[in-house]
Amino acid sequence: MKVQNTNINFQAGLTQKMQKEIASSDIKRIAQEFAKNGIQTDFKENKVIAWCSLKCLEIIKYLNENYHLNLGLPNGIFVEDFQNLNIQDKSSIGFLNFAPVKLHKKDSKITPEKTIFFNEFKDFNHSDGNEYWERIDCMADENFDRHFSSTDFFLEPILHEFLHAVHEQNLIQKLGGKKLVKLLEETLTPPKLEIFRAKYQNMLEKICVYASENPFEAVACDFSKRTIENIDKNVLLPCIDFVSQSPYKKQSLFKRFLIRKPDSKITETLHHFWNGKME
């Protein structure tokens, strides 16, 4: 997701209690919690990203444990100066690395798939970047006000990337790693994206503008919206099993072929994207 200029602050659900929790959070302990789940991290002492990432982890684990789902988790979460990465958009808030690739300009190591990167924003107001992230509530409000994001809740920028990882895990299970890489190469070419937007832009912009970028953003924006609409905003955990009533439900063969109810066009389209049918 790209950065939008921010100049308003509606608090976006970030309460004083949460702000105090962030300020007093122990990044080392948070990193250990991720390690227990097989997730490598380097939060670069950014308490906002660390705390919000932990809450997103808790949401997905809660859904899995309480509603017998199998939503995937990222392999790693790293805060980086995007100027040092081999990516085109240096101003983005964050991204998920879908395929193994060499990302660091001065390092030959291969970054695995399902790895989340958040922008350190070292040059933001000549600070170490933490000042930008401390305005995450303002950022969420502004993005929603521009219809650039599907929700104004402060967790959205972080949760969005986690849900890319959830989507990728589903695609890996459906297609396998090699077919997924081929799908990415075929889907994200400029000519294919032009066709995609011509066909789906009007429909997907009902979610938000960013959902019309490509099929992967469509799923992340919509899934994020559904998640945030169905969590208790005080404890930041889901209230119900909303996934089973969404385009991301797992259907048995019986339900899929014999008693399948007609879906809305957008639900059917998102269900296709979720399962790798990108046309």
Image (spheres, helix red, strand yellow):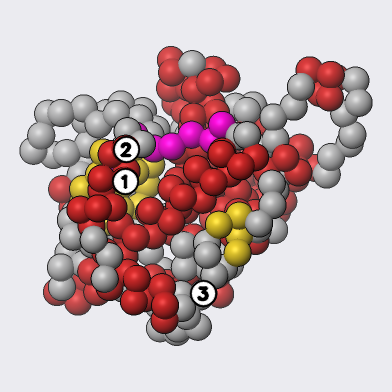
Q: Quadrant of residue 52?
A: bottom left
Q: Quadrant of residue 40?
A: top left
Percent from the top left, x then y, of residue 73?
A: 43, 37
| Residue under the image location 68 percent in, 43 percent down | 243
Q: Nearer the viewer, residue 21 or 110?
A: 21
Percent from the top left, x then y, of residue 231?
A: 61, 60
- As drawn, 61 above or below 168: below
Answer whether labels 2 and 3 touch (C-beta < 8 Å): no
Residue 186 shown left or right of residue 86 in the figure: right
| Residue under the image location 30 percent in, 57 percent down | 50
Question: Which amino acid type corresponds to the residue marked 2 in the rendered image?
Answer: Lys
Instruction: Say which element carries label 1.
Output: helix
Magenta segment: 70-79
| Residue under the image location 84 percent in, 24 percent down | 255
Q: Which residue is mark 3?
A: 13
Q: Nearer the viewer, residue 200 or 173?
A: 173
Mark number, residue 33: 1
Answer whether labels 3 and 1 touch (C-beta < 8 Å): no
Answer whether labels 2 and 1 touch (C-beta < 8 Å): yes
Residue 50 shown left or right of residue 177 in the figure: left
Quadrant assignment for the C terminus? top right
Of the two numbered discs 3 and 1 in the rendering, the one whose residue sits closer to the viewer? 1
Q: Quadrant of residue 49?
A: bottom left
Q: Which residue is mark 2?
A: 36
Instruction: Say which element carries label 2.
Output: helix
Of the two numbered discs 2 and 3 in the rendering, the one whose residue sits closer to the viewer? 2
Question: Which amino acid type corresponds to the residue marked 3 in the rendered image?
Answer: Gly
